[in-house]
Image: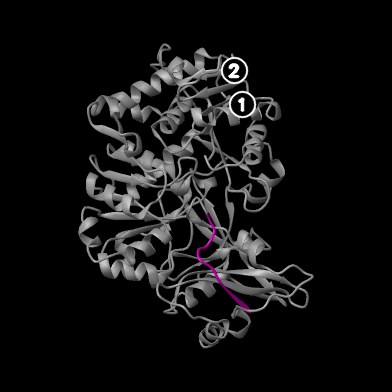
Amino acid sequence: MSNVSVFLDNRAKADPDMIAVVHPSSETTYTYHELASAVHRISGGLIAQGISIGDRVAIFLDSSPEYLISYFAIWRMGGIVVPTNIVYKEKELIHILNDSQATAIICDAAHENIVERLLPDAPTVQMIITTGSTTKSSPQIVSWGQLLVSAPLLESVSCNLDTVCQIQYTSGTTGAPKGAMLTHGGWIAALDNECDILDLVRGDMYLGIYPMGHVGLSWGISILKAGGTYICLERFEPERYLSLIEQYQVTVLSSMPPVIHMLAEAPDDTEQRIKTVRVLISGGGPLHSPTWKAFHARYNRPIVNAYGLSETIVLGAGTAIRPYHYQTADEYNSVGTPVGYTEVCIVDQDRPKHHLPSGEVGEIALRGPGLALGYWNRPVESGAVFLSDGWFLTGDIGYLDSDGMLVITDRKKDMIIMSGWKIYPTEVEQVLIHHPKIAELAVFGCSDEEKGEIPVVAVVLSEGVKDFSHDELAAYAKERLAGYKVPRRTYIVSQLPRLNGWKLLRGELQHMLCPSPDRQADNT
Protein backbone atom coordinates (compact mmCIF):
# COMPACT_ATOMS: atom_id res chain seq x y z
CA MET A 1 0.00 0.00 0.00
CA SER A 2 1.61 3.28 -1.03
CA ASN A 3 0.77 6.78 -2.17
CA VAL A 4 3.35 8.30 -4.53
CA SER A 5 3.13 11.66 -2.75
CA VAL A 6 4.62 10.21 0.47
CA PHE A 7 8.19 10.76 -0.72
CA LEU A 8 7.62 14.52 -0.41
CA ASP A 9 6.87 14.14 3.32
CA ASN A 10 10.08 12.20 3.82
CA ARG A 11 12.11 14.72 1.85
CA ALA A 12 10.61 17.59 3.88
CA LYS A 13 11.64 15.85 7.11
CA ALA A 14 15.17 15.19 5.84
CA ASP A 15 15.80 18.59 4.20
CA PRO A 16 13.16 21.06 5.44
CA ASP A 17 15.15 24.20 4.61
CA MET A 18 16.52 23.13 1.22
CA ILE A 19 15.01 24.96 -1.77
CA ALA A 20 12.71 22.57 -3.61
CA VAL A 21 11.07 24.76 -6.27
CA VAL A 22 12.02 28.04 -7.90
CA HIS A 23 9.65 29.96 -10.18
CA PRO A 24 11.69 32.78 -11.70
CA SER A 25 8.72 34.45 -13.42
CA SER A 26 7.00 35.17 -10.11
CA GLU A 27 10.22 35.31 -8.07
CA THR A 28 8.74 32.59 -5.85
CA THR A 29 10.64 29.86 -4.04
CA TYR A 30 9.49 26.99 -1.84
CA THR A 31 11.60 25.05 0.62
CA TYR A 32 10.76 21.37 1.00
CA HIS A 33 8.97 22.21 4.26
CA GLU A 34 6.95 24.97 2.59
CA LEU A 35 6.10 22.79 -0.40
CA ALA A 36 4.93 19.87 1.76
CA SER A 37 2.96 22.22 4.01
CA ALA A 38 1.14 23.75 1.04
CA VAL A 39 0.35 20.27 -0.29
CA HIS A 40 -1.05 19.19 3.10
CA ARG A 41 -3.29 22.26 3.32
CA ILE A 42 -4.56 22.13 -0.27
CA SER A 43 -5.32 18.42 0.20
CA GLY A 44 -7.32 19.21 3.33
CA GLY A 45 -9.05 22.05 1.51
CA LEU A 46 -10.12 19.80 -1.36
CA ILE A 47 -11.67 17.39 1.12
CA ALA A 48 -13.37 20.25 2.98
CA GLN A 49 -14.92 21.37 -0.32
CA GLY A 50 -16.40 17.92 -0.91
CA ILE A 51 -13.82 16.36 -3.24
CA SER A 52 -13.79 12.60 -2.55
CA ILE A 53 -11.43 9.71 -3.16
CA GLY A 54 -11.51 8.79 -6.85
CA ASP A 55 -12.89 12.16 -7.99
CA ARG A 56 -11.23 13.64 -11.05
CA VAL A 57 -9.81 17.14 -10.66
CA ALA A 58 -8.59 18.96 -13.77
CA ILE A 59 -5.68 21.42 -13.68
CA PHE A 60 -5.79 24.27 -16.21
CA LEU A 61 -2.77 26.38 -15.32
CA ASP A 62 0.48 27.51 -16.85
CA SER A 63 3.56 25.73 -15.49
CA SER A 64 3.90 27.07 -11.94
CA PRO A 65 4.32 26.04 -8.29
CA GLU A 66 0.51 25.92 -8.00
CA TYR A 67 0.37 23.33 -10.79
CA LEU A 68 2.92 21.18 -8.96
CA ILE A 69 1.21 21.62 -5.58
CA SER A 70 -2.14 20.68 -7.14
CA TYR A 71 -0.64 17.43 -8.47
CA PHE A 72 0.67 16.37 -5.07
CA ALA A 73 -2.43 17.53 -3.19
CA ILE A 74 -4.83 15.57 -5.42
CA TRP A 75 -2.65 12.47 -5.19
CA ARG A 76 -2.38 12.83 -1.42
CA MET A 77 -6.14 12.88 -0.80
CA GLY A 78 -6.78 9.97 -3.15
CA GLY A 79 -8.13 11.94 -6.08
CA ILE A 80 -7.26 11.57 -9.74
CA VAL A 81 -5.28 14.32 -11.48
CA VAL A 82 -6.44 15.38 -14.95
CA PRO A 83 -3.63 17.58 -16.33
CA THR A 84 -4.44 19.98 -19.17
CA ASN A 85 -2.37 22.51 -21.05
CA ILE A 86 -2.90 26.26 -20.80
CA VAL A 87 -2.80 26.50 -24.61
CA TYR A 88 -5.91 24.32 -25.02
CA LYS A 89 -8.84 25.87 -26.82
CA GLU A 90 -12.36 25.67 -25.41
CA LYS A 91 -13.37 22.65 -27.48
CA GLU A 92 -10.29 20.70 -26.36
CA LEU A 93 -10.87 21.55 -22.71
CA ILE A 94 -14.56 20.62 -22.84
CA HIS A 95 -13.70 17.23 -24.35
CA ILE A 96 -11.29 16.41 -21.52
CA LEU A 97 -13.63 17.65 -18.78
CA ASN A 98 -16.51 15.59 -20.14
CA ASP A 99 -14.51 12.50 -21.02
CA SER A 100 -12.94 12.37 -17.55
CA GLN A 101 -16.18 13.47 -15.85
CA ALA A 102 -14.17 15.93 -13.80
CA THR A 103 -15.73 17.17 -10.56
CA ALA A 104 -13.59 20.30 -10.27
CA ILE A 105 -11.08 22.36 -12.23
CA ILE A 106 -8.18 24.45 -10.92
CA CYS A 107 -7.37 27.56 -12.98
CA ASP A 108 -5.89 31.03 -12.53
CA ALA A 109 -7.85 34.28 -12.29
CA ALA A 110 -7.06 35.17 -15.90
CA HIS A 111 -8.92 32.07 -17.14
CA GLU A 112 -11.72 32.03 -14.56
CA ASN A 113 -14.27 33.64 -16.89
CA ILE A 114 -13.38 31.27 -19.73
CA VAL A 115 -13.83 28.22 -17.51
CA GLU A 116 -17.07 29.56 -16.03
CA ARG A 117 -18.44 30.06 -19.53
CA LEU A 118 -17.74 26.37 -20.28
CA LEU A 119 -19.71 25.01 -17.31
CA PRO A 120 -23.03 24.54 -19.15
CA ASP A 121 -21.18 22.29 -21.62
CA ALA A 122 -19.32 20.40 -18.85
CA PRO A 123 -22.13 19.38 -16.47
CA THR A 124 -20.04 17.20 -14.15
CA VAL A 125 -17.84 20.16 -13.10
CA GLN A 126 -19.29 21.44 -9.82
CA MET A 127 -16.43 23.68 -8.72
CA ILE A 128 -13.87 26.14 -10.09
CA ILE A 129 -10.82 26.63 -7.88
CA THR A 130 -8.95 29.79 -8.80
CA THR A 131 -5.35 30.38 -7.75
CA GLY A 132 -5.58 34.18 -7.93
CA SER A 133 -7.85 36.81 -6.48
CA THR A 134 -11.48 36.43 -7.56
CA THR A 135 -14.21 39.05 -7.53
CA LYS A 136 -16.95 36.46 -8.05
CA SER A 137 -19.32 35.45 -5.24
CA SER A 138 -20.56 32.27 -6.86
CA PRO A 139 -20.84 29.11 -4.71
CA GLN A 140 -19.18 27.27 -7.61
CA ILE A 141 -16.00 29.37 -7.34
CA VAL A 142 -13.52 28.67 -4.54
CA SER A 143 -10.26 30.54 -4.05
CA TRP A 144 -6.86 28.96 -3.48
CA GLY A 145 -6.72 30.96 -0.25
CA GLN A 146 -9.87 29.24 1.02
CA LEU A 147 -8.20 25.87 0.55
CA LEU A 148 -4.99 26.99 2.24
CA VAL A 149 -6.75 27.93 5.48
CA SER A 150 -8.39 24.51 5.77
CA ALA A 151 -7.20 21.87 8.22
CA PRO A 152 -4.17 20.12 6.66
CA LEU A 153 -4.32 16.49 5.60
CA LEU A 154 -1.36 15.25 7.62
CA GLU A 155 -1.56 11.63 6.51
CA SER A 156 -1.89 10.62 2.86
CA VAL A 157 -4.69 8.33 1.73
CA SER A 158 -3.38 4.78 1.40
CA CYS A 159 -3.53 3.41 -2.14
CA ASN A 160 -2.68 0.20 -3.95
CA LEU A 161 0.08 0.26 -6.53
CA ASP A 162 -2.52 -0.20 -9.27
CA THR A 163 -4.81 2.57 -7.98
CA VAL A 164 -5.39 5.15 -10.72
CA CYS A 165 -4.00 8.56 -9.73
CA GLN A 166 -3.99 10.37 -13.08
CA ILE A 167 -5.76 10.46 -16.42
CA GLN A 168 -3.16 11.68 -18.92
CA TYR A 169 -4.66 12.66 -22.25
CA THR A 170 -2.69 11.93 -25.38
CA SER A 171 -1.95 14.77 -27.77
CA GLY A 172 -4.85 13.84 -30.01
CA THR A 173 -2.87 14.14 -33.23
CA THR A 174 -5.06 11.33 -34.59
CA GLY A 175 -8.66 11.73 -33.47
CA ALA A 176 -9.92 12.81 -30.06
CA PRO A 177 -7.43 12.55 -27.18
CA LYS A 178 -7.62 9.36 -25.10
CA GLY A 179 -7.02 9.35 -21.36
CA ALA A 180 -4.27 6.97 -20.24
CA MET A 181 -4.95 5.68 -16.71
CA LEU A 182 -1.70 6.14 -14.78
CA THR A 183 -1.23 4.59 -11.35
CA HIS A 184 0.60 5.25 -8.09
CA GLY A 185 2.80 2.22 -8.80
CA GLY A 186 3.52 3.45 -12.31
CA TRP A 187 4.64 6.81 -10.98
CA ILE A 188 6.84 5.18 -8.35
CA ALA A 189 8.53 3.13 -11.10
CA ALA A 190 8.95 6.19 -13.30
CA LEU A 191 10.58 8.26 -10.55
CA ASP A 192 12.96 5.47 -9.59
CA ASN A 193 13.93 4.90 -13.21
CA GLU A 194 14.54 8.57 -13.94
CA CYS A 195 16.60 9.06 -10.79
CA ASP A 196 18.66 6.09 -11.90
CA ILE A 197 19.15 7.07 -15.53
CA LEU A 198 20.24 10.62 -14.62
CA ASP A 199 22.34 9.55 -11.60
CA LEU A 200 20.48 12.21 -9.62
CA VAL A 201 21.93 13.31 -6.29
CA ARG A 202 20.85 15.58 -3.47
CA GLY A 203 21.53 19.18 -4.49
CA ASP A 204 21.14 18.73 -8.27
CA MET A 205 19.73 21.83 -9.98
CA TYR A 206 17.22 21.08 -12.75
CA LEU A 207 15.89 23.57 -15.29
CA GLY A 208 12.56 22.27 -16.59
CA ILE A 209 10.97 23.51 -19.81
CA TYR A 210 8.48 20.69 -20.38
CA PRO A 211 4.85 21.77 -19.86
CA MET A 212 3.47 20.55 -16.54
CA GLY A 213 0.41 19.26 -18.37
CA HIS A 214 2.70 16.74 -20.10
CA VAL A 215 4.19 13.58 -18.56
CA GLY A 216 7.59 15.22 -19.06
CA LEU A 217 6.83 16.76 -15.67
CA SER A 218 8.08 13.43 -14.30
CA TRP A 219 11.69 14.62 -14.73
CA GLY A 220 11.04 17.55 -12.41
CA ILE A 221 9.29 15.40 -9.82
CA SER A 222 12.22 12.97 -10.00
CA ILE A 223 14.53 15.84 -9.06
CA LEU A 224 12.38 16.46 -5.97
CA LYS A 225 12.52 12.79 -5.03
CA ALA A 226 16.33 12.97 -5.18
CA GLY A 227 16.48 16.12 -3.06
CA GLY A 228 17.35 18.61 -5.77
CA THR A 229 15.87 21.92 -6.90
CA TYR A 230 13.31 22.23 -9.68
CA ILE A 231 13.52 25.55 -11.57
CA CYS A 232 10.26 25.98 -13.51
CA LEU A 233 10.35 27.78 -16.86
CA GLU A 234 6.97 28.12 -18.60
CA ARG A 235 8.34 28.02 -22.12
CA PHE A 236 11.62 28.00 -23.97
CA GLU A 237 13.23 31.33 -24.81
CA PRO A 238 16.93 30.96 -25.79
CA GLU A 239 18.44 33.87 -23.89
CA ARG A 240 16.33 33.36 -20.77
CA TYR A 241 17.13 29.65 -20.85
CA LEU A 242 20.88 30.33 -20.92
CA SER A 243 20.63 33.06 -18.30
CA LEU A 244 18.84 30.76 -15.86
CA ILE A 245 21.45 28.04 -16.39
CA GLU A 246 24.11 30.53 -15.37
CA GLN A 247 22.14 32.09 -12.52
CA TYR A 248 21.23 28.80 -10.81
CA GLN A 249 24.29 26.79 -11.86
CA VAL A 250 22.08 24.16 -13.44
CA THR A 251 23.43 20.60 -13.42
CA VAL A 252 20.56 18.74 -15.14
CA LEU A 253 19.03 20.39 -18.18
CA SER A 254 15.79 19.58 -19.97
CA SER A 255 15.88 20.06 -23.71
CA MET A 256 14.41 18.83 -26.95
CA PRO A 257 15.80 18.43 -30.48
CA PRO A 258 15.21 22.08 -31.56
CA VAL A 259 16.89 23.29 -28.35
CA ILE A 260 19.91 21.03 -28.88
CA HIS A 261 20.15 22.34 -32.43
CA MET A 262 20.12 25.89 -31.06
CA LEU A 263 22.91 25.04 -28.61
CA ALA A 264 24.98 23.41 -31.34
CA GLU A 265 24.76 26.65 -33.36
CA ALA A 266 24.98 29.08 -30.40
CA PRO A 267 27.61 31.87 -30.05
CA ASP A 268 31.14 31.00 -28.99
CA ASP A 269 30.68 31.92 -25.32
CA THR A 270 27.93 29.34 -24.77
CA GLU A 271 30.35 26.66 -23.56
CA GLN A 272 31.13 28.90 -20.59
CA ARG A 273 27.46 29.67 -19.97
CA ILE A 274 26.49 26.00 -19.57
CA LYS A 275 29.68 24.84 -17.87
CA THR A 276 27.82 23.55 -14.77
CA VAL A 277 25.55 21.23 -16.80
CA ARG A 278 26.60 17.59 -16.49
CA VAL A 279 23.72 15.94 -18.41
CA LEU A 280 20.89 16.92 -20.77
CA ILE A 281 17.56 15.23 -21.43
CA SER A 282 16.10 15.01 -24.93
CA GLY A 283 12.64 13.81 -25.81
CA GLY A 284 9.47 14.58 -27.71
CA GLY A 285 10.78 13.61 -31.13
CA PRO A 286 13.74 12.19 -33.03
CA LEU A 287 17.12 13.74 -32.30
CA HIS A 288 18.78 13.71 -35.71
CA SER A 289 22.31 12.34 -35.58
CA PRO A 290 24.05 15.39 -37.17
CA THR A 291 22.62 17.65 -34.46
CA TRP A 292 23.54 15.17 -31.71
CA LYS A 293 27.08 14.69 -33.06
CA ALA A 294 27.65 18.42 -33.49
CA PHE A 295 26.50 19.10 -29.94
CA HIS A 296 28.66 16.36 -28.45
CA ALA A 297 31.74 17.40 -30.44
CA ARG A 298 31.36 20.95 -29.18
CA TYR A 299 30.31 20.46 -25.54
CA ASN A 300 31.29 16.86 -24.69
CA ARG A 301 28.19 16.52 -22.53
CA PRO A 302 26.04 13.37 -22.51
CA ILE A 303 22.48 13.62 -23.76
CA VAL A 304 20.03 11.15 -22.26
CA ASN A 305 18.04 10.45 -25.42
CA ALA A 306 14.95 8.98 -23.76
CA TYR A 307 12.06 7.07 -25.26
CA GLY A 308 8.70 6.84 -23.55
CA LEU A 309 5.08 7.85 -23.99
CA SER A 310 2.16 9.26 -22.04
CA GLU A 311 1.05 5.67 -21.50
CA THR A 312 4.41 4.78 -19.89
CA ILE A 313 4.99 7.96 -17.79
CA VAL A 314 8.06 8.50 -19.99
CA LEU A 315 10.58 6.12 -18.37
CA GLY A 316 8.09 4.24 -16.20
CA ALA A 317 8.46 1.73 -19.03
CA GLY A 318 10.94 3.00 -21.57
CA THR A 319 14.50 3.11 -22.86
CA ALA A 320 17.33 5.61 -22.68
CA ILE A 321 20.93 6.22 -23.69
CA ARG A 322 23.43 6.31 -20.84
CA PRO A 323 26.82 8.03 -21.11
CA TYR A 324 28.63 4.69 -21.35
CA HIS A 325 26.53 3.85 -24.43
CA TYR A 326 28.23 6.48 -26.53
CA GLN A 327 30.81 4.01 -27.85
CA THR A 328 28.04 1.84 -29.31
CA ALA A 329 25.27 4.39 -29.84
CA ASP A 330 24.73 3.36 -33.45
CA GLU A 331 26.15 6.58 -34.85
CA TYR A 332 23.94 8.63 -32.54
CA ASN A 333 20.69 7.13 -33.79
CA SER A 334 19.66 5.01 -30.81
CA VAL A 335 17.36 5.60 -27.84
CA GLY A 336 19.26 3.03 -25.82
CA THR A 337 18.33 0.05 -23.72
CA PRO A 338 15.42 -0.68 -21.35
CA VAL A 339 15.42 1.11 -18.01
CA GLY A 340 14.60 -0.54 -14.68
CA TYR A 341 12.15 -3.41 -15.06
CA THR A 342 11.16 -2.49 -18.61
CA GLU A 343 11.14 -5.07 -21.39
CA VAL A 344 11.18 -4.14 -25.08
CA CYS A 345 10.53 -6.24 -28.17
CA ILE A 346 9.77 -5.73 -31.84
CA VAL A 347 6.59 -7.32 -33.17
CA ASP A 348 5.13 -7.89 -36.59
CA GLN A 349 2.77 -5.00 -37.34
CA ASP A 350 0.09 -7.35 -38.63
CA ARG A 351 0.70 -10.14 -36.08
CA PRO A 352 1.59 -8.51 -32.75
CA LYS A 353 1.99 -11.87 -31.02
CA HIS A 354 4.90 -12.62 -33.37
CA HIS A 355 8.21 -11.23 -32.07
CA LEU A 356 10.85 -10.31 -34.65
CA PRO A 357 14.58 -11.04 -34.42
CA SER A 358 17.36 -8.48 -34.00
CA GLY A 359 17.72 -6.14 -36.96
CA GLU A 360 14.19 -6.58 -38.33
CA VAL A 361 11.92 -3.54 -38.45
CA GLY A 362 8.51 -3.75 -36.81
CA GLU A 363 6.31 -2.18 -34.15
CA ILE A 364 7.92 -1.40 -30.80
CA ALA A 365 6.24 -3.04 -27.80
CA LEU A 366 6.99 -2.25 -24.15
CA ARG A 367 6.20 -4.07 -20.92
CA GLY A 368 6.87 -2.91 -17.37
CA PRO A 369 5.45 -1.59 -14.09
CA GLY A 370 5.10 1.98 -15.36
CA LEU A 371 2.46 1.13 -17.96
CA ALA A 372 -1.00 2.68 -17.83
CA LEU A 373 -3.88 0.33 -17.05
CA GLY A 374 -5.52 1.29 -20.33
CA TYR A 375 -7.60 4.19 -21.64
CA TRP A 376 -10.31 5.73 -19.49
CA ASN A 377 -13.74 4.38 -20.50
CA ARG A 378 -12.37 3.01 -23.80
CA PRO A 379 -12.24 -0.78 -23.53
CA VAL A 380 -12.05 -1.38 -27.29
CA GLU A 381 -9.15 1.01 -27.86
CA SER A 382 -7.44 -0.31 -24.73
CA GLY A 383 -7.73 -3.92 -25.84
CA ALA A 384 -6.19 -3.10 -29.22
CA VAL A 385 -2.87 -1.91 -27.76
CA PHE A 386 -2.71 -3.12 -24.13
CA LEU A 387 -2.36 -6.84 -24.79
CA SER A 388 -3.38 -9.61 -22.42
CA ASP A 389 0.23 -10.75 -21.89
CA GLY A 390 1.24 -7.32 -20.60
CA TRP A 391 2.81 -5.89 -23.77
CA PHE A 392 1.83 -2.39 -24.91
CA LEU A 393 1.90 -1.64 -28.65
CA THR A 394 3.41 1.83 -28.91
CA GLY A 395 2.53 2.66 -32.50
CA ASP A 396 6.20 3.41 -33.12
CA ILE A 397 8.32 1.57 -35.68
CA GLY A 398 11.91 0.50 -35.03
CA TYR A 399 14.37 -2.32 -34.53
CA LEU A 400 16.84 -3.69 -31.97
CA ASP A 401 20.44 -3.61 -33.17
CA SER A 402 23.08 -6.27 -32.49
CA ASP A 403 23.90 -4.64 -29.13
CA GLY A 404 20.27 -4.77 -28.03
CA MET A 405 19.84 -1.02 -28.43
CA LEU A 406 16.54 0.35 -29.71
CA VAL A 407 16.47 2.46 -32.87
CA ILE A 408 13.21 4.22 -33.78
CA THR A 409 12.56 4.63 -37.47
CA ASP A 410 9.13 6.27 -37.30
CA ARG A 411 5.61 6.52 -36.01
CA LYS A 412 3.36 3.83 -37.44
CA LYS A 413 0.77 6.44 -38.37
CA ASP A 414 3.40 8.57 -40.14
CA MET A 415 4.49 5.79 -42.49
CA ILE A 416 3.91 6.66 -46.15
CA ILE A 417 2.75 3.95 -48.55
CA MET A 418 3.39 4.86 -52.19
CA SER A 419 2.30 2.29 -54.76
CA GLY A 420 2.84 -0.42 -52.14
CA TRP A 421 6.28 0.85 -51.08
CA LYS A 422 6.64 1.67 -47.39
CA ILE A 423 8.51 4.91 -46.68
CA TYR A 424 9.51 5.93 -43.15
CA PRO A 425 9.84 9.73 -42.84
CA THR A 426 12.48 9.65 -40.10
CA GLU A 427 14.75 7.45 -42.23
CA VAL A 428 14.57 9.97 -45.07
CA GLU A 429 15.06 12.90 -42.68
CA GLN A 430 18.19 11.33 -41.19
CA VAL A 431 19.73 11.41 -44.67
CA LEU A 432 18.56 14.82 -45.87
CA ILE A 433 19.45 16.66 -42.65
CA HIS A 434 23.12 16.35 -43.65
CA HIS A 435 22.56 18.76 -46.56
CA PRO A 436 24.52 21.92 -45.69
CA LYS A 437 21.66 24.23 -46.68
CA ILE A 438 19.08 22.53 -44.39
CA ALA A 439 18.66 23.48 -40.72
CA GLU A 440 15.45 21.52 -40.03
CA LEU A 441 13.08 19.45 -42.07
CA ALA A 442 10.05 17.18 -41.90
CA VAL A 443 9.05 14.51 -44.38
CA PHE A 444 5.36 13.62 -44.64
CA GLY A 445 2.90 12.08 -47.06
CA CYS A 446 0.42 13.79 -49.37
CA SER A 447 -2.47 12.03 -51.06
CA ASP A 448 -1.93 11.23 -54.72
CA GLU A 449 -4.60 9.96 -57.09
CA GLU A 450 -2.22 7.66 -58.96
CA LYS A 451 0.12 6.41 -56.24
CA GLY A 452 -2.05 6.67 -53.13
CA GLU A 453 0.53 8.78 -51.30
CA ILE A 454 3.77 10.49 -52.19
CA PRO A 455 6.60 11.69 -49.89
CA VAL A 456 7.13 15.44 -49.69
CA VAL A 457 9.36 17.56 -47.45
CA ALA A 458 9.11 20.87 -45.61
CA VAL A 459 12.51 22.52 -45.14
CA VAL A 460 13.80 25.28 -42.85
CA LEU A 461 16.93 26.68 -44.49
CA SER A 462 20.21 27.26 -42.69
CA GLU A 463 20.96 30.83 -41.70
CA GLY A 464 22.07 32.95 -44.64
CA VAL A 465 20.84 30.53 -47.33
CA LYS A 466 18.67 32.30 -49.91
CA ASP A 467 18.35 29.90 -52.81
CA PHE A 468 17.32 26.28 -52.61
CA SER A 469 15.24 24.30 -55.08
CA HIS A 470 13.46 21.01 -55.19
CA ASP A 471 15.79 19.87 -57.96
CA GLU A 472 18.77 20.48 -55.70
CA LEU A 473 17.23 18.47 -52.88
CA ALA A 474 16.10 15.67 -55.19
CA ALA A 475 19.58 15.32 -56.71
CA TYR A 476 21.09 15.09 -53.22
CA ALA A 477 18.50 12.52 -52.17
CA LYS A 478 18.85 10.34 -55.26
CA GLU A 479 22.55 9.83 -54.53
CA ARG A 480 21.78 8.52 -51.05
CA LEU A 481 18.30 6.96 -51.10
CA ALA A 482 16.33 4.46 -53.12
CA GLY A 483 14.33 6.27 -55.78
CA TYR A 484 10.94 5.65 -54.20
CA LYS A 485 12.07 7.38 -50.98
CA VAL A 486 13.02 10.65 -52.69
CA PRO A 487 10.54 13.46 -51.85
CA ARG A 488 8.39 14.48 -54.79
CA ARG A 489 7.94 18.09 -53.65
CA THR A 490 9.88 20.53 -51.47
CA TYR A 491 8.29 23.33 -49.47
CA ILE A 492 10.41 26.08 -47.91
CA VAL A 493 8.96 27.17 -44.54
CA SER A 494 10.13 29.60 -41.85
CA GLN A 495 9.49 27.09 -39.04
CA LEU A 496 8.00 23.67 -38.43
CA PRO A 497 4.75 23.38 -36.46
CA ARG A 498 5.29 21.79 -33.07
CA LEU A 499 3.04 21.02 -30.13
CA ASN A 500 4.23 23.06 -27.14
CA GLY A 501 7.35 23.90 -29.14
CA TRP A 502 8.70 20.36 -29.34
CA LYS A 503 6.48 17.58 -30.75
CA LEU A 504 6.49 17.78 -34.56
CA LEU A 505 2.98 17.97 -36.05
CA ARG A 506 3.20 16.25 -39.41
CA GLY A 507 -0.58 16.28 -39.69
CA GLU A 508 -0.61 20.07 -39.55
CA LEU A 509 1.97 20.18 -42.35
CA GLN A 510 -0.26 17.91 -44.40
CA HIS A 511 -3.23 20.21 -43.79
CA MET A 512 -1.20 23.32 -44.64
CA LEU A 513 0.79 22.10 -47.63
CA CYS A 514 -0.76 19.06 -49.26
CA PRO A 515 -2.74 20.06 -52.35
CA SER A 516 -6.44 19.32 -52.32
CA PRO A 517 -7.57 16.61 -54.76
CA ASP A 518 -9.01 19.13 -57.20
CA ARG A 519 -5.83 21.12 -57.74
CA GLN A 520 -2.15 20.50 -58.42
CA ALA A 521 0.67 22.18 -56.48
CA ASP A 522 3.89 23.22 -58.13
CA ASN A 523 7.24 22.24 -56.70
CA THR A 524 8.98 24.92 -54.66
Residue 114: horizontal and vertical position, in percent?
Answer: 59, 31
Tell which of 26 and 308 is nearer to you. 26
Numbered disc in front, either 2 or 1? 1
Residue 43, image quadrant:
top left
Tell which of 517 and 35 is nearer to you. 517
Residue 366: horizontal and vertical position, in percent?
Answer: 53, 53
The residues tagged by marks 2 and 1 sit, at their Cα atoms, a distance apart of 9 Å
Tell which of 501 and 222 is nearer to you. 501
- Few, some or many residues within 10 Å of mark 2 (<14, 14–19, 20+): some
Mark before the other along the chain sequence, 2 or 1: 1
Instruction: Tell whether 241 sits left or right of 174.
Output: left
Residue 207: horizontal and vertical position, in percent?
Answer: 32, 46
Residue under numbered circle 1: 116
Tell which of 352 and 393 is nearer to you. 393
Q: Is there a contact, CB below 8 Å, between mark 2 and mark 1?
A: yes
- Magenta stretch holds residue 179: no
Badge 1 marks a residue whose secondary structure is helix
On screen, residue 462 above or below 27: below
The amino acid pointed to by label 1 is: Glu
Badge 2 marks a residue whose secondary structure is loop
Q: Residue, x 33% and y 47% (percent of image)?
A: 196
Tag on residue 140? 2
Residue 91, image quadrant:
top right
Q: Which residues are magenta?
A: 488-498
- Few, some or many residues within 10 Å of mark 1 (<14, 14–19, 20+): some
Q: Residue, x 51% and y 72% (percent of image)?
A: 429
Q: Residue, x 33% and y 70% (percent of image)?
A: 294
The amino acid pointed to by label 2 is: Gln
Residue 270: horizontal and vertical position, in percent?
Answer: 25, 61
Q: Which quadrant of the figure contains the C terminus?
A: bottom right
